[in-house]
Image: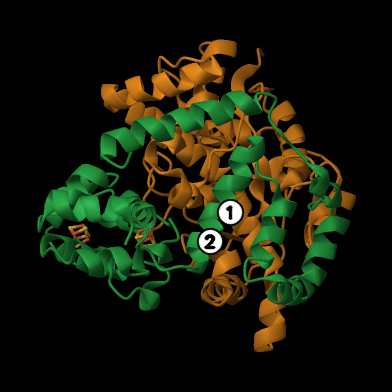
Amino acid sequence: MAKKQYAFYPGCSSQKGASASNFLTSIKVMTEKLDIQLNEIPDWNCCGASIGYAEGGELPRLVLNARNLALTEQNMPGMDMVSGCPACWLSSRETAERLQEHSSLLAETNEALKEAGLNLKSHVRARHMTEVLIEDIGYAAMKAPVVRPLDGLKIAGYVGCQTNRPFGIAGESFENPMYLDKMIETVGAEATKYDQKGTCCGGALAFSEPEKSQKQIRDIVEAAYDSGADMIVTPCQLCQANVEIYQSEINKKQGTQFKMPVVYYTQLMSIAYGGSAADAGLNGQLIKAEKLEKIAGK
Amino acid sequence: MSDINSQAVARYKNNFLREVEERVEDGHWVKMCMQCGVCAGSCPFGPHWEHSPQKLFMMIRAGKREEVLKTDSMWMCTSCYNCIARCPRKLPITHIMHGLANYAYRLGLSPKGQPNQVIARIFWNNAIKHGRVNELTFSLAMYFKDGIGQGIKNSLAMQGVGLGLMKAKRLNPMEILGGHTCKDKSGIAKMLTKAREIEDRRRGLA
Ligand code: SF4
Ligand code: SF4
């Protein structure tokens, strides 16, 4: 089968030595088995995330993202841009759509892009990795490479905010999306009844508003325990980092005994497809996902 | 009071709604709000918002300029997009919140030292300096935003986490020497300066 080609926008957090580097590790096995080829966008830059607004304003943020779209158009004509990071995806897609709708903004954007020797026609589609898996690959094909079903594993599917809103996955509801649960079941695990699927972890404000964010994170972890889950799985780099990292802080301050592993869906797929714990980047967990490691060792 | 603020006051007199429509990102949507209150119950940090988005929209229409621009409310926005998903009138509420915060900050009216404003500035400056975010210098800058003493306390408090991340190869101490960067840093800087110039001209802030 010919490989499906995409322009790949990894994003800052997935770089080597960064907080979500194990995400990048874990997609290798997955993309290989699913015949997906990710071609890294040359010299891509940061999306500015949602939090960049105070200093960034509107046009500079659009231009920052337009640069990545222009590099894609120029170097990988005809390919969709795909990102694994919800913030990168959201910023890119928002930019692509706003520039397609407003020709005056596109003209201003191009005036600025010229300074970097670039020009954007604005035909690129910005997509999220889960979107590509669900729409271009499909659940049946996602199931096909499973050689090591994750039998007996109970998982709380935590979608978070920006994978889900404002764009989300076509045909899914904002309040109770089912796709992550379906993906969990596709690899043989059980999705628990989890009522904090779309709860905000505090996002970038986990740094600047630790108390307020940790209240959110406490709800997210507690509900996972209540649902009987062995671990949380998420598509979001910031959710992963916040929900995993701050459990020890919450334990210290509030006397809880949280030790809930938080992994990416790509890590589940990597193990289910026959990858080792190292292939899945499981050595990158602060809270070890022991049950998943055990399955990987079989 | 900053010059651009007094100029804005002179220019728009008591028509704050028009000022917002012309100068705030997606501000032209404000008049579409029907005050249903759905967004008011949607913010994760809701109890900490002095004025909910719904109330801010009402205050804009009522011309409460100082109160709106000086509040720290919109700085509580986590960008969760709950409101956009739920608003029956399809207002891009998240963007309007970011836009109001940015406008207040540019006028010099936003609350000084508000932590989320500080983080937003540090993040942007870190990102554009190298084209990519350097997580180590970003975290250090965050911990030290309240000065050296508090910074050392904050860093010590999170030391366990930092060491854990380093061991897991998810935080690279060498990043302090530079870390990941884009090749065309000067092109990026030039295009962003230009973008700001164009936008300031359009918004009457230049
Ligand atoms: S949900 Fe929309 S219409 Fe309702 S109060 Fe909020 S902004 Fe206005
Ligand atoms: S995006 Fe901001 S304004 Fe909208 S619900 Fe979330 S916190 Fe509130």
Look at label 1 and name its amino acid.
Ile
Residue B150 appears at what percent x and percent y? 69, 76
Residue A31 appears at what percent x and percent y? 69, 30
What's the chain of the residue with tag 2?
A: B
Residue B49 position by quadrant: bottom left
Question: Considering the image in quadrants, where does the N terminus of chain B appear?
Answer: bottom left
Tint applied to chain B in the drawing? green
Marks 1 & 2, CB-CB < 8 Å contact: yes
Residue that carries the numbered disc 1 in the rendered image: B122
Quadrant for ligand 2 reads: bottom left
At horizontal 44% and vertical 36% (from top left) the residue drawn is: A60
Residue that carries the numbered disc 2 in the rendered image: B118
Tint applied to chain A in the drawing? orange
* Nearer the observer, A232 or B32: B32
Image-based side of B47 in relation to B87, left or right: right
Mark on residue A258? Answer: none
Residue B13 appears at what percent x and percent y? 11, 55
Q: Is residue A163 visible?
A: no
What's the chain of the residue with tag 1?
A: B
